[in-house]
Image (cartoon, rainbow, N blue to C red):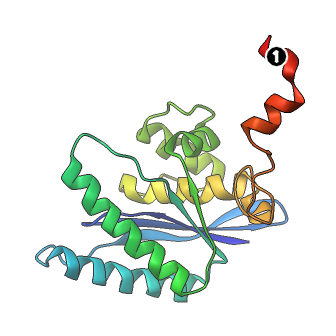
């Protein structure tokens, strides 16, 4: 299984491609897609999509993994990131690849063993996990590799998504079913 991890950004987007074969992981490639800094947001998004299509054509991933969106204090930045993520998702879906998303804490937990890890801790663990001499730079690239690593380590290539079955439906029947099955816990 070959997974492309993507860390989207309007100025630079990190990507990392990891292959899993017979229980071994290897990095096939990683880097940055950098749209021209002088362009408008729309032009940069277009360049990002073209760059992403090129990475996909060259690396031939079987799936793409992204970090779920989070909202910081800067609403404008969140809106721009939302546009970039939407363009990335549209590009990947247009090319017929499955997309899986992971919460930042889930990615950090998969890579470092704690969901509260800092970006630098993720970067320092990846060389050990992936057999690299040193962590790629900048952190956008290590974030993308961490996303791909999370996808593969969680067995998503086999199940369709962390915690979900191959059908894409949650294994859980939901809160109501749990309550019905365990009324003694509500007493």
Q: Position of residue 102 (x, y in %)?
A: 57, 52
In front: 12, or 69?
Answer: 69
Q: How many marks?
A: 1
* Left or right placement of residue 41 versus residue 4 in this view: left
Asked if residue 71 is positioned above or below residue 155 in the image, the reply reads above
* Left or right placement of residue 61 versus residue 163 in this view: left
Label 1 SS: helix
Residue 119 in view here: yes
The image quadrant where one finds the N terminus is: bottom right
Asked if residue 120 is positioned above or below residue 163 in the image, the reply reads above
* Left or right placement of residue 133 versus residue 77 in this view: right
The image quadrant where one finds the C terminus is: top right
* Left or right placement of residue 171 versus residue 149 in this view: right
Q: Residue at x 19, y 78 (%)?
A: 36
| Residue matched to label 1 | 185
Pick out the residue farthest to the left: 38
Q: Position of residue 123 (x, y in %)?
A: 47, 46
């Amino acid at each position: 299984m070959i997974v492309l991890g993507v860390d989207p950004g309007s100025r630079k987007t990190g990507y990392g491609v990891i292959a899993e074969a017979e229980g071994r992981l290897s990095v096939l490639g990683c880097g940055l897609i950098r749209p021209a800094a002088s362009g408008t947001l729309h032009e940069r998004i277009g360049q990002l999509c073209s760059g992403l299509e090129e990475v996909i054509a060259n690396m031939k991933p079987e799936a793409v993994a992204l970090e779920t969106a989070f909202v910081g204090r800067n609403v404008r930045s969140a809106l721009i990131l939302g546009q970039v993520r939407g363009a990335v998702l549209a590009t990947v879906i247009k090319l017929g690849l499955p997309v899986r998303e992971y919460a930042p804490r889930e990615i950090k937990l998969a890579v470092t063993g704690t969901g509260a890890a800092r970006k630098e801790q993720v970067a320092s663990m990846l060389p050990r996990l992936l057999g690299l001499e040193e962590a790629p730079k900048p952190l956008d690239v290590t974030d993308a590799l961490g996303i791909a690593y999370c996808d593969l380590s969680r067995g998503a290539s086999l199940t369709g998504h962390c915690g979900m079955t191959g059908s894409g439906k949650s294994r859980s029947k939901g809160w109501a079913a749990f309550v019905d099955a365990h009324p003694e816990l509500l007493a």
